[in-house]
Image (tube, rainbow, N blue to C red):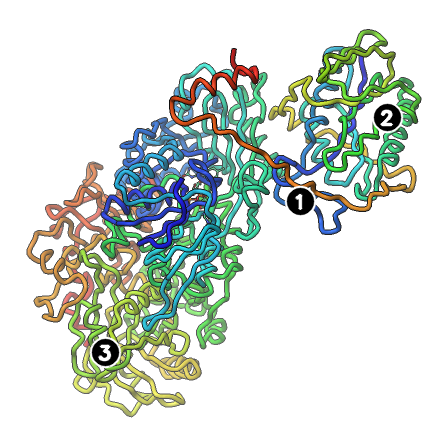
Amino acid sequence: MATVPSTANVVVIGAGIVGNSLVHHLTRLGWKDVVQLDKGALPNPGGSTGHASNFIFPVDHSREITDLTMDSVRQYQEMGVFTQSGGFEVARTEERMEELRRRMSSAKAWGIDSELVTPAQVVEKVPFLDPDQIIGAFWTPTVGVVDSLRAGTIMREQALATGELTVVAGAEVEDLVVEDGEHGRRIRSVVTDQGTIEASYVVIAAGVWSPKLGDMAGVRIALTPAVHQMISVGPCPQLAETDGEISFPIIRDMDTFCYERQHGADMEVGSYAHRPILHEPEEIPSIEQARLSPTEMPFTEDDFDQQLEEALELMPELLGAEGAEIRYAINGLLSLTADGNPILGESEVKGLWVSAAVWIKEGPGVGRAVAEWMTHGHSEIDLHHSDIARFHPHETTREHVRARTSEAFNKTYGIVHPGEQWGSDREVRYSPMADSQKALGAVFHETVGWERPFWYDSNADLLETYGDRVMPREHEWDSRWWSPIINAEHLAMREHAGVVDLTAFSIFDITGPGALASVQRTCVAQCDVAVGKVVYTPVLDAKGGFLSDLTVMRLGEDRFRVVTGGAHGMADRKHFTDRLVDGAELADVTEEVSTIGIWGPKAREVLASLSSDDLSDGGFGFLTSREIDVKGVDAPVLASRISYVGDLGWELYVPFSAAASLWDALLTAGREHGVRPVGIGVYGTTGRLEKGYRAFGAELDAERTIVETGMQRPKVKAADFLGREAYLAQREAAPAAVLCTLTVDDHTSASGVKRYMLGGEPILTTDGQLLTDGHGHHSYVTSAGSAPSLGKHVLLAFLPPEEATIGNRLAVSYMEELYPVTVGSVDATPLLDPDNERLR
Amino acid sequence: MADVLVCVKRVPDFSGEVLLSDDAQSADARYVGHTLSNHDLCAVETAVQLAAATGGSATVLTVGSADAVEQLRTALGVGCAAAVLVEADPVTLGPADVAREVAAVVADHEASRGASYDLVLLGNDAADSGDFQVGIRLARLLDRPVVTGVQTVTLDGDRATLVSDVAEGRETYRVPTPAVVTVLEGGVEPRYPTITGRMKAKKIPVEERALSAEPVGSGRVRLRVPAPQSSTSTLLGEGPEAAPAVVDLLQQLGVAR
Ligand SMILES: Cc1cc2nc3c(=O)[nH]c(=O)nc-3n(C[C@H](O)[C@H](O)[C@H](O)COP(=O)(O)OP(=O)(O)OC[C@H]3O[C@@H](n4cnc5c(N)ncnc54)[C@H](O)[C@@H]3O)c2cc1C
């Protein structure tokens, strides 16, 4: 057996499905001198992989997760360890049936063959299921099971065959040594109980133990070990007669949060219905201490009693069969994160990578994607929802993770609205004007801890003013986490002006003699501009995919301010930090600088009434910034004339201490002009959609290009920047997809209730056929929302180029009904005010 | 129609490493959870089989903490029909206390039923404290015959036949009932609960009782975990050449012929 070497290029910690996938893909991509460590013995070292139920349902509402899963299935198939069984998600309630209709949307959008079926159709394939318990089901034929231990062995052996991998089983990592360098901390070595390895790269793929390993290097890995209970009941005579591991489709009993999966003569019943049972990584027993394995904790029977009853209800003859006993029962440990997504990518310690909180269903796909990322700096599948850099500091605390995962656990099979708000760990960050907002009846939604007013109940009077123009929604689902007041505020902004709290922006100042070079090599747009200029720019990866879009202000020769959305702020900070040249520094001023926007036809008049500065179009041009004085505000206000809502106005940057006075001054001065406080519902959705403005995470991600999104400028700057070569090539080729703006022509459903899409729905031909773009992807709605000034519901979607023609009539599928839509714009041209006259 | 009382103890599951509590008075089940020892499980299985074979009933009893209801439910889940918990902090109890409490329950139950338990079964010894005394002390208190280390039990009228396989051969005892028997694992295969069994178990009320007298305790100073037994492994060979040696060994163990 191999011993621990003294040096390695890369050390992978963990030999579960994730570690094994990683060593395979790293060596495949040409990495040399790879060492894999696990404290346990192979092939089953005692992690979660050893006792997984190992089934895969491909459809998820997240495109990223679905793509990783589909890639994993492909890899499992190539290794010959995938058995297709088919799977049903059964509904016991009408509410669940509606969710299954929504699942059909995701299936179609992500290109997975699924259909809704009747109880009788379920019983045809699963004769021991009681059809009277269910009202319908979602059938996916490509559901299957894998042998994840065998897959791990195959991948490890493939890696060993390259001659570049050393595997040491039975070696426990006890410390990670990090050194301080000029550009931050960097990994140096891995200390094991059998010697120390100097390494340039280390990957933590240690499943539920990952936070403990991260702590060794001062990196917080925000996951918690959590119990998932599973029992195995058998021998069941109905199963004993069948050949092989699985012959019947897997059942997910969605309303009881349970599944039933055949395993030979046994039926495995697993549950997400019990109380959340969280553990601390430090408290997981050692291999010696554990009864079965460290991740098979003693079964707590009481937590499962309810599930037994419900499972028996669904499959009385099978689970109640003579001789069918509960032969195995565990509290299995798996990893949960606050947002449910994996934790992947390079940590703030250079060279120290993480690949954790990954399920069997995504394992090999994640292995490939992370290996690509380590190799090229980007992966084929966009991973931004899983990026470890996404976390804001408060989101990495154990308390936050415990609170959110406790809340989310019972939603594993839950019906989660796209706008759903968390109940736990709220009120973490408030902007300085929160008192005023509360007094105004703000309805707060959360973004990365910030409590942001989505609308103000004090604006309810506007509902009467605007009547039906607020486009009220009759259906509870369509109007959940939404209010017609948003649309009323929107109309008031367009008519008068609105004041918006944008404190949640992430703001970094980049300074020093290297500041210009740092910004230039990161951003696509020309940033070597006159002091005072404001630049809107994409940030790309090397393959020309979007990492971000944001604004950069040149505040001085050696001084730039980067302003970006809070949600992606931490990842953006890493993009800039990673590309700082010598002589440049980045300071995060998010918690010091508050931002307030004022937009609308009256914006200039209101602001001018408070300031002696020249705010005329000639004196304060579009896309410029400068400090102004504002009456009643005890600090200089940095005003920037840009707009994300398509109306004349400014973003005003002000120290936290002076923000409330600026807020009050604007509202007070604006009152006589009909100016209202306006929520994020307007800023993030209605305002931007009328203008066709793209949003990162919706339209823009690493799989989309500037050309496809219609955002190319006539010229490309001469200075080099990341992704330049790829971008130049993209400009020469015809786009594979075109981002279009569509409007819904008729909202009336079969029942007569008007329905409003919320995003994620497939765009189809008028007769319901899928559209496929040049990437082989199907068209789906990336953003949806009201455009109250147009009286239309607007959808953004990437269409195949041949469908991207103005006036083209297509359909959107919502809850399994088709609604007619028309293409209104095939580039960034806004539906409202195409010549941007309102901005002047 | 045999009525059997089976006495069990909630103990840590010692298939993992044994850890002690800080005061070394008990074992720590933090990582391993609680269970019934294999002897106890075999005693329960024997009780359930006897009850089923004769149309009688099996009652399970434990002297222990309120949490021990979990173990009572395990026994109920595989076919016991009634359960008794004598609630007490197990650390304060010695074998004389446990025997006295069981005897008190037996006396009470027999008085109210007007009939005696044909058999009182216990596990041979407790997996954690290992005193090996309760069965014998109980028999003395009840003035009944006792046989320890029994693997199979058959009842024929008012006689019980008790068999165990020991290193020297097979021992068979015939005793008149009522009698006390301590059960050694190996004679019966304990069953797992069925879902319906488990659900039924949930609904059976547990008779809760307090101690009948102040405990005298065990006089135990402290527990100590013995040094791990050194195990030696013999390498039988490598690759296909090792096959004959493996076959030999399997034949020696009686696994293959
Ligand atoms: C009951 C149950 C059923 C499940 N069923 C499914 C399913 O049907 N489908 C599905 O997709 N997922 C399922 N999962 C989830 C799945 O098991 C896990 O998500 C997956 O196995 C995680 O793989 P991993 O490689 O990240 O972690 P692990 O398999 O836990 O591997 C981590 C490895 O790191 C090693 N390690 C840790 N610390 C150190 C150290 N200090 N030094 C050296 N080595 C160390 C460990 O020994 C371990 O081998 C299930 C989970 C449970 C509990």
Mark 1 Cβ and ligand 1 under 8 Å apart: no
Question: Does B158 appear above or below B93?
Answer: above
Residue where numbered disc 1 is placed: B19
Find the distance from the CA under tag 1 to the CA under tag 2.
29 Å
Q: Amino acid at mark 2?
A: Ile
Q: Secondary structure at mark 2?
A: helix
Q: Secondary structure at mark 1?
A: strand
Residue found at the very far left of the displayed protein: A732
Asked if one can make out residue A487 in the rendered structure from this viewpoint, the answer is: no
| Near-viewer residue (A516 or A638) | A516
Please give the name of the residue rendered at 11% of the width and 50% of the height, measured from the top-left corner: A805
Question: Does A567 appear above or below A98?
Answer: below
First in sequence: mark 1 or mark 2? Answer: 1
Q: Amino acid at mark 3?
A: Gly
The image shows residue B122 at horizontal and vertical percentages of: 78, 25
| Near-viewer residue (A182 or A783) | A182
Q: Secondary structure at mark 3?
A: loop
The image shows residue A416 at horizontal and vertical percentages of: 43, 47
Count residues near mark 1 (Cα–Cα under 10 Å), then give few for <14, some for 14-19, many for 20+. some
The image shows residue A428 at horizontal and vertical percentages of: 49, 67
Q: Chain of mark 2?
A: B
Q: Chain of mark 3?
A: A
Q: Quadrant of the N terminus of chain A?
A: top left
| Near-viewer residue (A733 or B179) | B179
Q: Amino acid at mark 1?
A: Leu
| Residue A231 located left or right of residue A616 | right
Residue where numbered disc 2 is placed: B136
Q: Which mark is residue A514?
A: 3
